[in-house]
Amino acid sequence: MALPAPPAPTRSPVSPAPGPVAERARGTAWRAGGLLVATGLLAVAVAASVAVGSKGIPLADVLRLLAHGDGSDAAVIIWDHRIPRTLLAVAVGASLALAGALMQALTRNPLADPGLLGVEAGAVIAIAATIGLFGVTALQGYIWPSFAGSALAALVVYLLGASGRAGATPVRLALAGTAVSAALASSTQALVLFDPEAFEEFRHWGTGALAGHDLSVAVKIAPFTAIGIAIALLLGAPLNALALGEEAGRALGVSPGRVRILGAIAVTLLCGAATAAVGPIGFVGLIVAHAARLLVGADNRWILAYCLVLGPVLLLLADIAGRLVLWPDELEAGIVTAFLGMPVFVALVRRRRIAQL
């Protein structure tokens, strides 16, 4: 007598766990959706920046005046003051955020920021010296010294932080940057005191002011920021390869020296142009880079993309807050970002162990 056939296997009602490809696709979709949301926040911040100020203008009137200017006071405020201010905030915010993310990835230092590692201070003293010694007061005249000063200061900080047996640890780099920034800031103040009249505009610029600039400032820094942004975004994949180690990076076809040189060029262009345009604005790179890493993980391609959008959002919101907190007077955006950034910096420093990225 034949034995009965075994029952056919039944499928488990539980779906199989997704494979690596499905998980990667899902992660990409979430990150892309988050980037789209961040872009929407940027659009809202831009609209608020144009509408909000000592003279509030309804958004419907803003849209009407953007389409058809009528020569009214509101139109003059929008076209001559708020639009240049908003465009500068977008360009400077993106530049500083990308520079901060690049510096953190290149040095594997979670405390890296253009303001904390002396890059902005180097640009500031170079501009101050150019104004004081040569009487140059136009942006196109002192933007090149700004590039040179930021690059030289970054080099000095790295050499100081890398000296000794421990090498360039995050804390050593932060301490070297703080020392160099303090020395350069004191030297800048000494230059200002020698000729107060020549530095009247410089003192206002030195607070990180987005107000008081016309559209030509944004136009003049646009080529430098565009090149810096393009280089930064192209370095996302190579930086991911180098995060595995230099030997692994070379095996993947990435040249560590080339990546570092291109990264230094991008940081110099982004920080030098932003500082020359509006003065030193600190902590944007620190805050935005850590926020982007918290949202998307360690993939530098996504971190840099998010920084490109979230940097302008942060700086626009800081500028709007500065217009409202002392209304009808204003608080400079650089002061607001300092208030926001100090708690973040203290929280990072107070960690028991600051690991490299």
Image: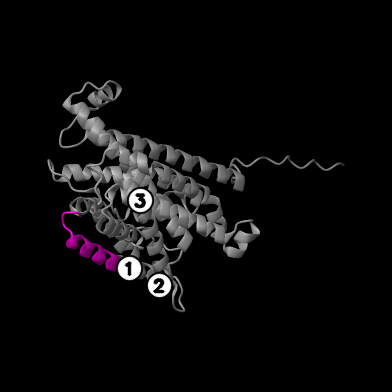
Residue that label 3 marks: 143
Residue that label 2 marks: 160
Residue placed most toward the observer, 287 or 143: 143
Figure label count:
3
Q: Residue at x 62, y 60 (%)?
A: 250
How far apart marks 2 and 3 lie (CA) works out to 26 Å
Q: Which residues are magenta?
A: 182-198
Answer with left or right where residue 286 lies relative to residue 105. Answer: left
Magenta span main SS: helix
- SS assignment at label 1: helix
Residue type at numbered disc 2 = Leu
Q: Residue at x 54, y 57 (%)?
A: 259
- SS assignment at label 3: helix
- Mark whose residue sits in front, 1 or 3: 3
Precedes in sequence: disc 1 or disc 3: 3
Q: Are marks 1 and 2 in contact (CB under 8 Å)?
A: yes
Mark on residue 180? 1
Q: Are marks 2 and 3 in contact (CB under 8 Å)?
A: no
